[in-house]
Image (spheres, helix red, strand yellow):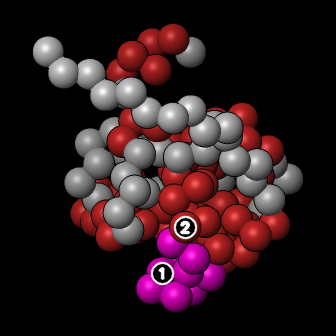
Amino acid sequence: MSAEVGAWEPGVKLGDEHAQALDTAVRDLASADAGRLRQVANADPNECARLFEGRESARLTGWLKALVLAGESIPGCDAGAKSPAIQLARLLRKRGDYPGELTAWIKSVSSNRFLPYGSLADRLRR
């Protein structure tokens, strides 16, 4: 039996630089700050909620798409069932602003089986 012990690292506080990285990724994923995108993809859900709150739905839709694409092309951005794209999808649905064609698009570009709904276990806990 093998067990790896890693160093604990405190969670990253998401801020304007992360919002800027997401905005850049919406326009051109290749020129976005991959390190910042990794930080968003792996951030604590509460930090993501803080970053997402109060933002326009159109901007959040762009961020969701950018995070889905980043999960496919940037190492360390595939967060599986913990992807912030799931949190964004839930927020957009709650607002009534989830685009009807978005699920089909996500399924066509992503290998993450949890997108856009999350894991069944997480959905049952809600």
Position of residue 55 measured from the top left corner of the image (x, y, whole percent): 80, 59
Residue interval drawn in magenta = 24-34
Relative placement, left or right, of 118 versus 11 is left
| Residue at 29% from the left image edge and 59% from the top image edge | 110
Which comes before the other along the chain, label 2 or label 1? 1
Is 21 or 111 nearer to us in this picture?
Answer: 21
What residue would you read off at disc 2? 35
Residue 40 found in image quarter: bottom right
Q: Which is in the foreground here, disc 2 or disc 1?
A: 2
Closest to the observer, 81 or 17:
17
Q: Secondary structure at mark 1?
A: helix
Q: Amino acid at mark 1?
A: Leu
User: Is residue 26 in the magenta section?
Assistant: yes
- In the rendering, at what x and y percent does residue 47 appear? 73, 42
**Could you tell me residue 79's position as x and y percent?**
41, 45
Callout 2: helix, strand or loop? Answer: helix
Q: Type of residue at label 2?
A: Gly
Residue under label 1: 29
Q: Please provide percent x and percent y for residue 16.
A: 81, 66
Query: In front here: 61 or 76?
Result: 76
